[in-house]
Image (cartoon, rainbow, N blue to C red):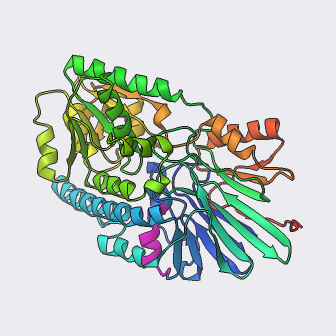
Amino acid sequence: MKIHFLGASQQVTGSCYLIEAAGVRLLVDCGLFQERAYLERNWAPFPVPPESLDFVLLTHVHLDHSGLLPKLVREGFRNRILTTPASADLLPIVLLDSAQIQEEDAAQKKKRHRKEGRRPRHPEVPLYTTAEAERVNRLVKRVPYEKRFALRKGVAVRFREAGHILGSASIELSLKEGRRSFRAVFSGDLGQWKKPLIRDPEVFKQAQTVVMESTYGDRDHDAPADTETSLGRIIKETVSAGGNIVIPVFAVERAQEMMFHLSRLIRQGRIPRLPVFLDSPMATDVTDVFLRHQECLDKETTGLFRSGQSPFQFAGLRYVRTQAESKAINGLRQPAVIMAGSGMCTGGRIKHHLVHNISRPESTILFVGYQAVGTLGRQITARPPEVRIFGQPRPLRARVEQIHGFSGHADRGGLMDWVGHFRPPLPVLFLTHGEKEVALGLARSLREERNLDVNVPGYQDLYELKFSFNS
């Protein structure tokens, strides 16, 4: 078996692994690079000819795992993309939104460069178009959780709950010869245990090799109760100051999770009733998918629906679709919570709300998700005197807060616990989807505390694994 690491290697975005085993060539994920230092990789030709691939196995729909699928299809991939039913419903929403943002950004850059008299290194064209994004959906095949799906004779795949976002999965790839078997497990992005909305991650007990994410491998999150208390405190303090709470959110999961917590804080009287805007047509569509896939939700959330207390409907909440409605928010004369995408401030409507609030000392920019190196969100969390938005320097006078406990990723303790369920003989472990120092630090801990054979692959590293089959 060969594993070729084509992304998320000593970095957080661009998840993509080429697997060659038993005559099958497949990708696990095909993600967009989002850190500024690596954006050029999105435009480079694929390291492997797309037409040579038999399958793509998609762990979940976040763009750093799915965002290069339209490019892969445009450049020759014609076979099946396997994923869970909820992910299959979310994927066209996510990819079309990505394509629309890229088309809009390309047009905006072209206009700005013309005005400034600049000659850019690259033509101002989108990475892919909405038409190219739409072509992906024709190749998607739904595979239910826990079903063993045969790729070829002796080669099968199984999707198991990863607890990260709706439809997210860890993937088990199994090879069989008679009674002998070999298993490789890909964690995808692992969620936290005992969080609201979706089910907890499932664990595995046997594998010869494991590829595991390491995003928060250097820290432990706050307890859920402390996280919600922090959210309430920040909102009350900002309202008292007369400002807005601007929250960059990922349209899939983080927006819905924030609505869950805001609805509970308002219903319990722990924050004042105030306007709450979800300014994202995409997040609105995603919320509809949540309602269609309640089989993926946890018992607490389904109980709320049965009792008539939907976390997606509460006093003050408004779903914003049109640009006119979005612009009208900034004319409001009372404090409000404004949630908009993208979650790392790399595009979308959040940039417009930042322009109107980032220089207001009474407002708060609240980050509730991971901010990758080189993104606008990461720059703001460093609290520099000013940041560039839409090509213009903007003084940063707003309050900047960050709550890590809302993360959809397992923390160090959660990762150690997940990998600790594998029984001897222990697997060879590869750590991906983490900043270099974080992954290396987690690798040291796993070697010392769990006696694991751990590797931290670099970009385009190739490993050939020669294992004897288990009987």
Report if residue 385 is visible in the image: no
- The percent position of residue 296, horizontal first and vertical second, equals 49, 54
* Drawn side of residue 180 relative to residue 308, left or right: right
Residue at 34% from the left image edge and 48% from the top image edge: 342
Note whether 274 is above or below 209 in the view shown. Answer: above
Q: Which quadrant, please, contains the N terminus?
A: bottom right
Note whether 310 is above or below 286 in the view shown. Answer: above
Of residues 77 and 359, the one drawn nearer to the viewer in this rendering? 77
* Drawn side of residue 244 relative to residue 347, left or right: left
Q: Residue furthest front?
A: 307
Note whether 98 is above or below 242 in the view shown. Answer: below
Q: Quadrant of residue 256?
A: top left
User: The magenta stretch spans which residues?
Assistant: 66-77
- The percent position of residue 300, horizontal first and vertical second, equals 47, 40
Of residues 204 and 342, the one drawn nearer to the viewer in this rendering? 204
Residue at 63% from the left image edge and 54% from the top image edge: 187
Q: Which quadrant, please, contains the C terminus?
A: bottom right
